[in-house]
Amino acid sequence: MARAVDHEGRKRRIVKESLRLFAAVGYAQVNFGMIAKNCGVSRTLLYTYFRNKRAIFNKAIEEVTSRVVATYETAMATGASADAKLRRVCAAVFDQLYGNRDFICVIADVLAGYRRKGATPFEKIAQHTGGLLRVFTRILEEGIARGEFRPVDVPRAASVLYSQFEAAALRIAVTNTADRAESVAEMDAILRTLRADSVK
């Protein structure tokens, strides 16, 4: 009797093993044959799941961002304060950053490679950046409208919040001492300044 194959599970395993390989060797240096060997599958089988290594990388981005989006959608569906929503989304992003260190190292490697070539980054990375900025903008506007946050330059405030994730990602990519609690404390200091009751 033929055994059923868990195709989604296999795809997740391929993505996970590929990220480890990208982080260890460097994205640009990895080819499809190396990925297949590292995952213990044939190149032909690998092609049935992914057409190239960029498709694997895009799948990794999709998996990480979908978890953040799910948290955002849950937060927005609640009657919680804008401050609570913002904190929930920030916590989810930090969870993904610190829970996916290989992924962060690979993104840093890919972005550095694009910078060296003078090229633009993958569309998926740009979509994530823009999406998270829109999330922050929406929550900030909601908080200002409700009187929870003081009036601020919303695009600039959203950019400052996003920059905290960039800083955390850089720490994760280049040091062994990146600490989630420290990143959360820094974000908390910024979030406290947004509150309407912070102005005396």
Image (cartoon, rainbow, N blue to C red):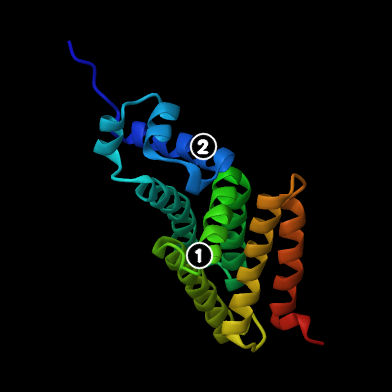
Mark 2, secondary structure of its residue? helix
Looking at the figure, which quarter contains the N terminus? top left
- Dot 2 crowding, Cα within 10 Å, few <14, some 14–19, many 20+: many
- Dot 1 crowding, Cα within 10 Å, few <14, some 14–19, many 20+: few
Percent of width and height locating residue 104 = 58, 51
Looking at the figure, which quarter contains the C terminus? bottom right
Q: Which residue lies at the image location 64% right of the left edge and 69% below the top edge?
A: 163
Closer to the camera in the image, 137 or 39: 39
Closer to the camera in the image, 141 or 132: 132
Closer to the camera in the image, 79 or 93: 93
Percent of width and height locating residue 147 = 62, 85
Mark 1, secondary structure of its residue? helix
Above or below residue 98? Residue 7 is above
* Amino acid type indicated by mark 1: Lys
Q: Is residue 16 left or right of residue 51?
A: right
Above or below residue 95? Residue 49 is above
Q: Mark 1 points at which residue?
A: 117
- Residue 176 seen from this side: yes
Between the residue at mark 1 and the residue at mark 2, the CA separation in whole angstroms equals: 22 Å
Which label number is shown at residue 21? 2
